[in-house]
Image: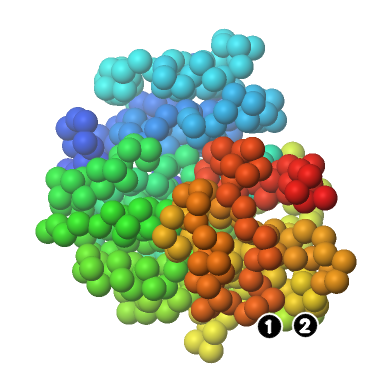
C-alpha cells in the first residue's frame, strides 16, 4: 500500500505514463504523465507565490478537470487542500474563512465574489480553466522528494444538524488506508470508466470516482454536480461509463423519471442516506445495474462499510472494510445502539475544536452519533441519529424510519418527523412534508400503517406551507437542519 497520494500518482505514472486518466467533457484527455507534470509545475508555482508546505489553500469550483488537477497538485505538493462548496451561502463561507484563515484562495470567477473582501490579497480568480492549466504547464518543474504520511492532506467541511460546518482534518495516511480498503472490499476491475458527479469538495467525490480510477488505471470524467443528474444517461452513453458514485436522491430521481436506454453502466455506489431496498431492487432490475449501498462519514475519510458485487440488495449498508472495525454501543431497552468505529482511516481531529474532538474521538474510537445494529451476517443497518431519537410511551422513535417511508408516498418530495409535547404519552409524532398541498392525511396514515407500528404513526401531519415556510431548512449539502427546524417549530403556535 502506498502511504501518500503523491506516491500513488508517481507509481502509476511510472508504470503507464501514456495512460489517459482524465477523460473530460470539455477538453482533451489528460494522461498520467500530463497530470504528474502539472503536479510538479504547480509545486513550483506555489513556491513562486511563497506558499509553504502545510499552508492552507482554499479552492472554490464546481467539478471540473481543473478542480481534479488542483486536488492532486495541492495534496501532492504537501499543501493542505480546503475545498469549498460553491453553493454555500456568504455567511457560511465567511465562517469558514474566519475559522481556517487561508494562505491562498483559488476560485472560479463565478463564485469567488463570495469570499470576504479582507482576503482579496490572497485570491487568484480563474476566468478560464484551460488558460490557467496551460499557464501552469508552461512553468518549470520542482520535484517532490518526500511526503510524510502524517502530513495533513486536506480539511473538509461537513454540515451537521446544527448547520455549523465542522472542519475535519484528514492525513495522507487516513486517505490511503480508506482508498485501499474500498478497493479491496469491492474488488474493482481495472481499465474501467468512472463518472464523477458527486462533488470533489465532499469526500464522496474524491474516492470512488477520482482515486479508485487512478489506482486501477481507469478513466474519470468530472461533471458538474448540479446539472449532471439531469444529463445522467447521456453522459453515461457519451463516455461509455461503467461506474459512478451517487447519493440516494440521485437514485430516487432516476427511478421516478426512468426511461429505457442502452448503456455500459455496471454498478452505482450509493451513500449519503439510507437507501430504500425496494427502490434499490426495482432500480437494479429495470436498468440492469447493480446498486451497492454503503455507509460512511468524512471522519472516517469516506466509506466504512459497503455492499459488494457479490452481496447487494441486502437492505443494509454492507459489512466493514478490512481497514476499520464497526461496533455498536447498545441503547437501554433497544436492539439498536450508537455506531462507533476503529481504524487507521479515522480523521486526526476537528480543526481548532478540541472539545468536539474529545467528545467524538475517545481513545482509538470515533463515536459517529448514528444509531444502528448488525444483522446475522455482520451487515450494518443504520437507523437514525442519536440526537434525532425521541420517546413515545416508553418506545424509541427514529424519525428517519418514518421519513424514508413517507418520502416514498406519491406527492411527498421530502419530509421531517419530530416529537412535540403530549401530556399522556410524553411526546407525539408529527410529520411535516414538502410536495402536493392537498394530500389526504388519512391516505398517508393508511400508507404508513402498512409498515409501521401504531405508536410510530404521526398524530399530526402538516404541509410546510401550513407553517408559513417555503421549504424544510437544509444545509448546502441537502441535509435537514434538524435542530434549527425544531427551534423554528418551538416558536410556532401550532407546537405550543
The answer to whether 37 appears left or right of 72 in the picture is left
Residue 287 place in picture, x, y as percent: 22, 65
Residue farthest along the left direction in this orientation: 262
Between residue 32 and residue 477, name the one nearer to us.
477
Residue farthest along the right direction in this orientation: 423
Residue at 28% x, 69% y is 284
Q: Mark 1 = which residue?
A: 335
Q: Is residue 364 above or below residue 239?
A: below
How far apart, in angstroms, are the residues tagged by discs 2 and 1?
7 Å
Question: Is residue 200 something that shows in the picture?
Answer: yes
Quadrant of res 351:
top right
Q: Which mark is residue 333?
A: 2
Report helix, strand or loop for mark 1. Answer: loop
Residue at 61% x, 17% y is 116
Between residue 328 and residue 72, name the one nearer to us.
328
Residue 419 place in picture, x, y as percent: 74, 61
Q: Is residue 452 above or below residue 127?
A: below
Residue at 38% x, 76% y is 313
Amino acid at each position: 500500500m502506498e502511504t501518500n497520494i503523491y506516491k500513488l500518482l508517481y507509481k502509476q505514472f511510472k508504470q503507464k505514463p501514456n495512460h489517459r486518466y482524465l477523460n473530460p467533457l470539455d477538453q482533451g484527455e489528460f494522461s498520467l504523465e500530463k497530470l504528474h507534470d502539472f503536479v510538479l509545475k504547480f509545486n513550483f508555482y506555489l513556491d513562486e507565490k511563497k506558499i509553504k508546505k502545510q499552508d492552507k489553500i482554499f479552492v472554490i469550483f464546481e467539478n471540473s478537470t481543473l478542480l481534479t488537477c488542483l486536488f492532486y497538485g495541492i495534496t501532492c505538493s504537501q499543501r493542505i487542500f480546503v475545498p469549498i462548496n460553491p453553493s454555500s451561502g456568504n455567511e457560511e463561507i465567511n465562517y469558514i474563512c474566519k475559522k481556517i484563515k487561508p494562505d491562498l484562495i483559488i476560485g472560479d470567477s463565478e463564485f469567488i465574489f463570495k469570499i470576504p473582501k479582507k482576503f482579496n490579497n490572497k485570491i487568484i480568480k480563474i476566468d478560464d480553466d484551460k488558460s490557467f492549466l496551460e499557464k501552469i504547464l508552461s512553468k518549470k518543474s520542482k520535484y517532490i522528494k518526500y511526503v510524510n504520511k502524517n502530513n495533513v492532506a486536506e480539511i473538509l467541511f461537513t454540515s451537521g444538524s446544527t448547520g455549523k460546518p465542522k472542519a475535519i482534518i484528514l492525513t495522507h495516511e487516513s486517505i490511503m488506508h480508506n482508498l485501499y480498503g474500498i478497493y479491496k472490499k469491492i474488488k474493482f476491475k481495472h481499465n474501467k470508466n468512472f463518472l464523477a458527479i458527486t462533488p470533489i469538495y465532499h469526500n464522496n467525490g474524491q474516492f470512488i470516482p477520482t482515486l479508485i480510477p487512478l489506482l486501477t488505471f481507469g478513466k474519470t470524467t468530472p461533471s458538474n454536480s448540479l446539472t449532471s443528474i439531469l444529463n445522467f444517461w447521456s453522459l453515461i452513453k457519451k463516455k461509455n461509463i461503467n461506474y459512478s458514485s451517487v447519493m440516494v436522491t440521485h437514485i430516487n430521481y432516476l427511478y421516478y423519471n426512468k426511461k429505457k436506454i442502452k448503456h455500459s453502466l455496471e454498478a452505482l455506489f450509493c451513500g449519503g442516506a439510507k437507501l430504500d431496498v425496494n427502490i434499490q431492487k426495482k432500480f437494479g432490475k429495470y436498468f440492469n445495474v447493480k446498486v451497492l449501498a454503503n455507509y460512511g462519514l468524512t471522519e472516517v475519510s469516506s466509506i466504512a462499510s459497503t455492499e459488494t458485487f457479490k452481496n447487494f440488495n441486502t437492505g443494509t449498508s454492507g459489512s466493514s472494510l478490512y481497514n476499520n472495525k464497526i461496533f455498536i454501543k447498545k441503547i437501554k431497552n433497544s436492539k439498536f445502539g450508537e455506531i462507533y468505529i476503529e481504524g487507521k482511516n479515522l480523521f486526526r481531529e476537528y480543526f481548532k475544536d478540541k472539545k468536539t474532538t474529545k467528545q467524538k474521538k475517545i481513545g482509538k474510537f470515533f463515536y459517529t452519533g448514528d444509531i444502528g445494529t448488525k444483522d446475522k451476517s455482520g451487515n450494518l443497518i443504520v437507523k437514525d441519529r442519536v440526537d434525532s431519537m425521541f420517546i413515545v410511551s416508553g418506545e424509541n422513535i427514529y424519525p428517519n424510519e418514518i421519513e424514508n417511508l413517507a418520502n416514498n408516498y406519491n406527492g411527498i418530495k421530502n419530509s421531517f418527523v419530530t416529537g412535540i409535547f403530549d401530556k399522556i404519552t410524553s411526546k407525539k409524532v408529527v410529520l411535516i412534508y414538502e410536495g402536493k398541498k392537498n394530500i389526504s392525511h388519512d391516505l398517508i396514515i393508511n400508507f404508513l400503517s402498512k409498515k409501521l407500528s401504531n405508536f410510530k404513526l404521526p398524530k399530526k401531519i402538516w404541509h410546510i406551507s401550513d407553517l408559513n415556510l417555503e421549504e424544510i431548512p437544509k444545509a448546502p449539502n441537502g441535509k435537514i437542519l434538524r435542530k434549527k427546524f425544531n427551534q423554528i417549530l418551538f416558536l410556532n403556535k401550532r407546537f405550543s
